[in-house]
Amino acid sequence: MTLHIYTSLRRIDKIYQQEKHGSKMAFLDGNPPERLCMPIVNHIESLGGEVRLNSRIKKIELNEDGTVKSFLLNNGNKIEGDAYVVATPVDIFKLLLPEDWREISYFKKLEKLVGVPVINVHIWFDRKLKNTYDHLLFSRSPLLSVYADMSVTCKEYYNPYQSMLELVFAPAEEWIACSDSEIIDATMKELAKLFPDEISADQSKAKVVKYHIVKTPRSVYKTVPNCEPCRPLQRSPIQGFYLAGDYTKQKYLASMEGAVLSGKLCAQSIVQDYELLRTLGQRKLTGASIH
Ligand SMILES: Cc1cc2nc3c(=O)[nH]c(=O)nc-3n(C[C@H](O)[C@H](O)[C@H](O)COP(=O)(O)OP(=O)(O)OC[C@H]3O[C@@H](n4cnc5c(N)ncnc54)[C@H](O)[C@@H]3O)c2cc1C
């Protein structure tokens, strides 16, 4: 379970001015596979599509002219198509990048986009904390960026007697290699400052019933100066090959809404290229040369 909050707060100043619903936040009411992914899978299948799980791309295989021949999957299967989309995180795509494409400026610029480590901390307490709200909270702690009491904000985790805090522990560069118990100790010390009446680092106040730590060594790309021009458009310079994902060019920074928007822009590019892709596909079938 991860904290999934659709928030547009990232560019708060601009968003409030430009976006009608810029100040809206909402929690996914339940676990993401069931509540977020399954409806998408159902929609794809209802339109005749197929969703294959546990089928990672191992290699992007090329034709002699540098276009994509197939995606080789880790189960040995090969996927061939008229249009190819890679929607993995940028760091994974860089590992899959074919040697022949590395010097192309569009792909070379991706080197500047590097994911930051983030840790997600889930803590179940033996009591209900009084000073939490039905909202995402930005914390004053230098280690805990945002958090929420899921027992208040999400129906599925609602509990009138015990709080369950979910926290984003970042920046986490110095902590990603630490043990879970070191991370939970550091979290409790910070929480003791945020909830001085209710939490103490030695647990003499609220007690931790259980906890769960999720480490993401390469999360969303780090926004460093001049990284914006390095974000790629969804249509690549390779005919029939497209990228999608939060790091690709769209008006938001890396976020869930940004990822969704990138998918829409990617789909639009493929629709615009439909005639070209169809012609290329037919030429491949008849064995005619592709230029
Ligand atoms: C702790 C944490 C908290 C966050 N909180 C928020 C938040 O509150 N609000 C918000 O808007 N955003 C938040 N984000 C950011 C948000 O999760 C990302 O921006 C978003 O998920 C990016 O979507 P994506 O589709 O680009 O990539 P991903 O969601 O990373 O999806 C990429 C997919 O590619 C798959 N994949 C990987 N390798 C391969 C391969 N070789 N072949 C095929 N598939 C592969 C992965 O399994 C994955 O399903 C948070 C991120 C983290 C880590």
Image (cartoon, grey):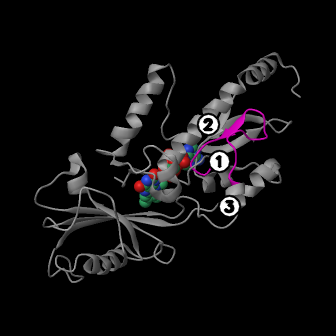
Mark number displayed over residue 195: none
Label 1 residue SS? loop
Q: Residues within 10 Å of mark 3 (few under 14, many from 20)?
A: some
Main secondary-structure element of the magenta-colored stretch: loop
- Label 3: which secondary element: loop
Do the numbered discs 1 and 2 sit on residues whose CB atoms are within 8 Å? yes
Residue 238 colored magenta? yes
Magenta residues (range): 230-248
Is residue 205 visible in this depiction of the protein? yes
Amino acid type at circle 1 is: Lys
Q: Earlier in the sequence, mark 1 or mark 2?
A: 1
Relative to residue 159, is residue 290 drawn left or right? right
Q: Is residue 102 above or below residue 121?
A: above
Residue 138 part of the magenta-drawn span: no
Q: Residue at x 41, y 75 (%)?
A: 143
Mark 1: give few (<14), some (14-19) or many (20+) Cα within 10 Å: many
Can residue 75 be seen in the rendering of this structure?
Answer: no
Quadrant in the rendering for residue 268: top right
Q: Which mark is residue 249?
A: 1
Q: Amino acid at mark 3?
A: Cys
Does 241 appear above or below 120? above
Where does residue 166 sit, x and y in percent of width and height? 31, 62
Residue 90 vs 213, above or below: the answer is above
Q: Position of residue 105 (x, y in %)?
A: 81, 52
At 43% across and 76% down in the image, what residue appears? Answer: 178
Crowd class of label 2 (few under 14; some 14 to 19; many from 20; radius 10 Å): many
Q: Residue at x 73, y 32 (%)?
A: 240
In the picture of the structure, the residue carrying the numbered disc 2 is 265
Residue 291 lies, in percent from the top left, at: 89, 28
Q: Which residue is mark 3?
A: 227
Q: Is residue 20 left or right of residue 31?
A: right
